[in-house]
Amino acid sequence: MSTPASSWVLRAKELPQPGQLVLVYVPTAWQQITVAAFKTPTTAGAKHMFVTPDQNGVNRYVKGVTHWMSLPEPPSDPS
């Protein structure tokens, strides 16, 4: 399902596709809006998760995501 880039989606109502990069909103974090990928849980009882790579390329879980939205299209002319 494609979500317009300008619409925040409540995480409890809908989730992005596995591996999809999205903007996530975490109201309790220092950096409230960041880019993360949705990761399908691999263990029983685990909740849906969002991850973002750290400076070493290691995926770190983003906790407290309440909303997400699709990334906007990049500019057509990079200059």
Image: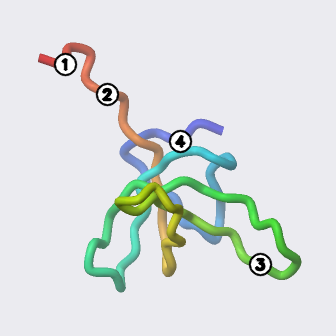
**Does residue 55 sit above or below 63 in this rendering?**
above
Question: What residue is shown at x 40% (from left), y 75% (from top)?
Answer: 26
**Does residue 57 sit above or below 25 in this rendering?**
above
Give how far across and how far down residue 38 sits, in percent.
60, 56
For mark 4, give the secondary structure: loop
Distance from disc 2 to disc 3, alpha carbons, whole Å, reads: 33 Å
Q: Going from the N terminus, do you reach mark 2 or mark 4 first?
A: 4
Q: Going from the N terminus, do you reach mark 4 or mark 1 first?
A: 4
Q: Amino acid at mark 1?
A: Pro
- 4 or 1: mark nearer the eye: 1
Crowd class of label 4 (few under 14; some 14 to 19; many from 20; radius 10 Å): few
Q: Which residue is mark 3?
A: 46
Question: What residue is shown at x 36% (from left), y 85% (from top)?
Answer: 28
Distance from disc 4 to disc 1, alpha carbons, whole Å, reads: 24 Å
For mark 2, give the secondary structure: loop
Give how far across and how far down residue 7 sits, in percent.
42, 50
Q: Which residue is mark 4?
A: 3
